[in-house]
């Protein structure tokens, strides 16, 4: 679904083909960012371009929410946030994932973006949202807690693309 949301400092909009270079150099090629993600560090802007083209084709699905995070002040693409899946099917609990350029960490941008996406999902009728973070990803855990996440446990999760398993902290954000 193509949808644009706004916050005080951000525009959350659908990804566009022209975002590939900014995404690649902003975070997709950064080992420090991607070490916390399920996918591998991208090796070229062309690899990023293929992923964005896939995401664009998925916008036709009503359940697919995937946003480019853009600073209002500069128009610069700084990250992405999306519903990576649903527990129990499309009418189940949405699961949010996100990534942010390291140069933008610790400025409240991801908390702002996640809060807005969570609100959008609540407006669509969902009662709870799931967000997971690697146990050592303290920055992401802080974002989740600021968004009202309640810790529900840990789980060992396989990352097939990376050929490893990680320990994740699971959180639920419930509608008031």
Image (cartoon, rainbow, N blue to C red):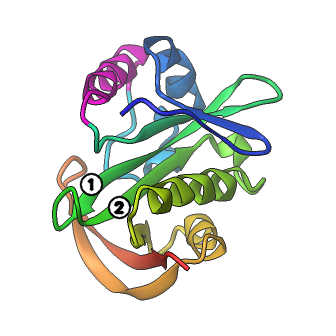
Residue 45 in magenta? yes
Q: Position of residue 45 (x, y in %)?
A: 43, 17
Q: Which numbered disc flags the more N-terminal residue, 2 or 1?
A: 1
**Disc assigned to residue 85:** 1
Q: Quadrant of the C terminus?
A: bottom right
In magenta, the rendered stretch is 43-61
Is there CB contact under 8 Å for labels 2 and 1?
yes
The label number, if any, that marks residue 143 in the structure image:
none
Q: Would residue 37 be visible to someone looking at this image?
A: yes
Q: Give the image quarter of residue 47.
A: top left
Q: Residues within 10 Å of mark 2 (few under 14, many from 20)?
A: some
In the image, 174: left or right of 8? left
Residue 20 shown in magenta: no
Give percent across and percent down for residue 15: 46, 25
Residue appearing at x 71%, y 41% in the figure: 103
Compared to 83, does 172 lie above or below?
A: below
Q: Residues within 10 Å of mark 1 (few under 14, many from 20)?
A: some
Report the front residue among 113 and 34.
113
Which residue is under mark 2? 95
- Residue 36 in sight: no
Q: Main secondary structure of the magenta part?
A: helix
Q: CA distance from mark 2 to mark 1?
A: 5 Å
Residue 176 in the figure: left or right of residue 6: left
Instruction: Report the quarter where the N terminus lies.
Output: top left
Determine the secondary structure under disc 2.
strand
Q: Is residue 19 above or below residue 90?
A: above
């Amino acid at each position: 679904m193509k949808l644009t949301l706004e916050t005080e400092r951000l525009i959350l909009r659908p990804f566009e083909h022209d975002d590939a270079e900014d995404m690649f150099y902003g975070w997709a090629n950064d080992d420090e960012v991607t070490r916390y993600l399920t996918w591998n560090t991208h090796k070229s802007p062309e690899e990023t371009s293929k992923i964005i083209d896939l995401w664009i084709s998925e916008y036709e699905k009503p359940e697919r929410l995937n946003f480019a995070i853009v600073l209002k002040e500069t128009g610069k693409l700084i990250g992405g946030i999306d519903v990576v899946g649903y527990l129990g099917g499309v009418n189940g609990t949405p699961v949010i994932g996100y990534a942010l350029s390291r140069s933008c960490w610790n400025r409240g941008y991801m908390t702002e973006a996640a809060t807005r996406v969570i609100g959008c999902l609540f407006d669509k009728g969902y009662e709870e949202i799931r967000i997971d973070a690697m146990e050592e990803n303290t920055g992401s855990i802080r974002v989740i807690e600021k968004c009202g996440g309640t810790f529900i446990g840990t789980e060992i999760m396989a990352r097939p693309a990376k050929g490893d398993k990680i320990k994740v902290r699971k959180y639920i954000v419930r509608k008031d």
